[in-house]
Every structure is written in structure tokens, then in C-alpha cells.
Image (cartoon, rainbow, N blue to C red):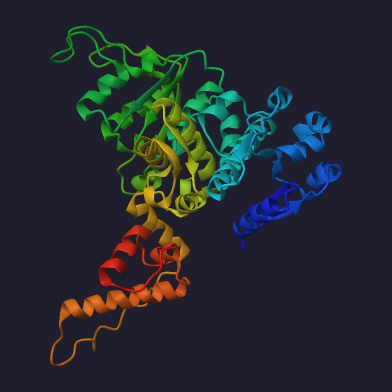
Amino acid sequence: MRDNGTILIADSDVKTRDLVSAFLTYQGYSIAVANEGATFFDTIKKNNVDIVIADLAYLGLIAPDFSERSTQLNSLIVLIGYGESPNAEFKKKCSDSVFSLPKPVNLDELESLVMRAREYQSMKMFDRCSVASGHNQILSTSMTGTSEPMRALFEMITKVAASNATVLIQGESGTGKELAARAIHQLSDRNSKKFVPVNCAAIPDDLLESELFGHVKGSFTGAYANRAGRFEMADKGTLFLDEIGDMKANLQVKLLRVLQNREFEPVGASKSQKVDVRIVAATNKNLEELVVSRDFREDLYYRLSVIPITIPPLRERRDDIPLLIHTFLTRFNADKRHAVKGFSRDSLGILCNYEWPGNVRELENLVERLVILKGSGLITPDDLPEKYLSGKQIHAVPVQTTPLALDNLLPEGGICLNTAVDEFENNLIMQALARSGGNKKEAALLLNLKRTTLIEKLKKKNLAFSED
């Protein structure tokens, strides 16, 4: 069983303590117990406790010591009995790291609070990493992550920002290339000037030159006045050329000249214009392959990639998924005025195992969609679109890669196809239920189905089952 961390349970009620201990042990947590108030903080230190679950009456046994030493707690979940309420001093000492839960304990709500406490700790760790690594508030608010790939990225961005070198940011769509470019600008000594983005793939080829370099009046049909281009607008600042791999050859030549001579000519102009611009380019394509196929100039590639930066895809930093979900959930709850509590352990596990071809942007869109549709309560696997459940099955269950031997399945006298398919499906369902010990949720995962879909099939086929 995996180890999700250590939780200290402090409650004089033996039944509650045993129930919570058994439930969280099954969830993969290591459990420590503090039986007496005097051992409370010693037990925390000795066992390297991540989360404390304590009865409000128990905390009264260690007051006022609790008020003085409460900052030693990472996260605290307070169990509040009927008729009890925290006093003003307790509320004052309790910050965002403290969560309350009424007795008798609802295990689903407890699981949700434990997940929120872990998300809170991830956010605090991110803040500490930002400070320890020399990242300022700009970086920590623009990009989210505490995984090793993201720490290395933050360190690279901090170093690059201090220079004036041209930067090439590479990464898949949706990884946050523009966020990285903005962070470089904000951390540089050009941050008082403009950050000007240009999507080279979104602007038609015949307009991109004018968009970049500007034009003079009368230079082409519709040019009724002089117009400044993005290079001029970004003077003394940063120009972000997104999707640079889609730029056509004729513009690549002109861009190369700007990088070499720090000057450009507006469309229709007879004189060059000096400019002081830092170039940050980005692409989701492999420019080296484009150079080999002669779709991208080799000299421009080397001019752009003075300092290359690669943004890791989300599947290579899965540890950041709970923190990203928490960040998006908090934002969309506020924006939509909804009250979704969080994601259940099972739904969070499914999302952590998904491949995320759309990366962080896909995750952000999913959380927004779920907040809008759910409105309140806890998001469970039944709330997730089917394709995410399929992604869970791919990673949780070994895939049968050996092809079925189909040569001798058809009898010489023929067969009733519908009956054979139905029997084959029934056999697979019963095998999945047998392998999962009758657990419908696990059986559904083995079959790449939703639990509700499996139950409907069992009812329709009149197969024996019990509602679990």
C-alpha cells in the first residue's frame, strides 16, 4: 500500500479515534495517536506528522499551550462535538490551515478535508520553494508547481530574466509558454516597459509583416495612415513571438535582420528604424526537424535559441495536478459564485493518472466545466467525462497486448452473432466482478466503464449482484 503521509489523531473518544484511524489507514496514510495532552506536540515532532485530526475538547486539555505552539502544526482538522463551538481566541489562532468537521464524523467529508489539507500544504511548500530559490511574487503567481521539473524551470527563468539574451521556449500546446515568457519579462529590468505578444500562426501571412513592422500611409490598399508595428510598440520592452515555427520564409529573413542589426523597415518605408527589443520566441514544433526539412532557416534558429527553455508537459509533472486543481477550483468558485468543495480521492486519482494531451490548459478547462455543472458538493468519478475514466484504466490496469486468436472462433455451421457477443460481454463482466471481489467501482475500471453504466448492464442482463 502506498504511503500518503502521516496523520496524528488526538481524540479521547476511543470509538471515533478507531473509526478514523481504520478509515485513513485503508486510504494509505500512516497513523499516529496522541493519548494524552502532554504528548501532543512531542508526537507530532517524533512522527513527522503532516496533518493533525483532533477533537475540540481534546485541544482544550492542552490549552493555553496550544495557542502558543499552534504554528508548529502543518494542517489541523478539528472535530467538533454537538453543542460545542470554538472560542474567539481559538478562531484567532486558526488560519487557513485549520478545517472543522462536526461529529459524528462523516467519512466522505473527512476524506475531502484531508485532501484540502494536503492541497494547502502543497501551496505552502510552493511558497517556501519560491523564497528559497530566489523567485519573487511575480513568478509564484504566474506559474504553479512544486515538482522537480517545475523547480528547475523556475530556476532557469530566474537566471535568464537577468540577461538580455534571446530566448526560445519550446513545449507542447497548453503547457504555459506565454506564462513563462511573461515571467521572464516581469523579472527582467525591462518590466517597466511593454510586453507585446504576437501569435504568428493566428495572423494571415499577408498581414503578418505589417503587424510586426508597421507600415506607412499609401504602402498598400487600405493603408490610410501610418501605423506602428509590434516591434516599435515593444521598444525597450519584450516582444513575444508565439508559434514562431509557423512563420513563412520571407518573414524569417526580415526577422533575422532585426536580430542581427537591431533595426527594421516598416512596409513601404525607405528608411530603417532602430529598435531596442528583447525577443522571446515560442513554438510547439521541433525547429531542428524544420531546419533539416528546410522549412525553417538554420541561421534564424541559432539566433533565436541562444537560451532554449523547455516547458515540461503535465504528464511529466503529475505531482502538480492536485495543486493546479486547487488553484483553478478556488478561482472558478469565486468567479462563478459556486461552492464546489473539492475532488474526491478517487476522482483525483483518476485525473492524476490521465495523459493530459492538452496539458494545463485542458485541466483548467475541465475544472471550470465541472464547477459550472456541479455547482456545489464534492466532485466524484461519476462527474468526470468518460474519456478521463478511460485514461485511468490505461494506467491502473495492465493492457492486454496479445491479439485474440480469432481464426477458429467461428464454427463450421455458423453462429448467432448477437447471442455470442452477449455471452462474451457477460463473461467479461463476471470475470471483472470476480477479480474485484464484487466491488462495482473496481470492476467498472477494469472494463473501462462508469460504475453506473456497469450497474445498468447488470440490471438489464439480470445478472446477480448486490448494490455496494
**Residue occupying the far front of the picture:** 83
454 vs 219, nearest the viewer: 454
* Placement of the N terminus among the 4 image quadrants: bottom right
Residue 396 spot, x, y in % from top left: 47, 63
307 vs 349, nearest the viewer: 349
Does residue 264 appear in this view? Answer: no
Quadrant hosting residue 64: top right
**Residue occupying the far bottom of the picture:** 412
Q: Residue sitting at 49 percent across and 49 percent down?
A: 348
Residue 9 spot, x, y in % from top left: 72, 48
Horizontal placement of 318 versus 267: left or right?
A: right
Quadrant hosting residue 415: bottom left
Q: Is residue 24 above or below residue 413?
A: above
Number of marks in picture = 0
Does residue 342 appear in this view? Answer: yes
Q: Residue sitting at 31 percent across and 60 percent down?
A: 453
Residue 46 spot, x, y in % from top left: 82, 49
Q: Residue sitting at 69 percent across and 33 percent down?
A: 132
* Placement of the C terminus among the 4 image quadrants: bottom left
Residue 329 spot, x, y in % from top left: 46, 35
Horizontal placement of 428 versus 177: left or right?
A: left
**Residue occupying the far right of the picture:** 38
369 vs 452, nearest the viewer: 452
Q: Is residue 150 above or below residue 130?
A: below
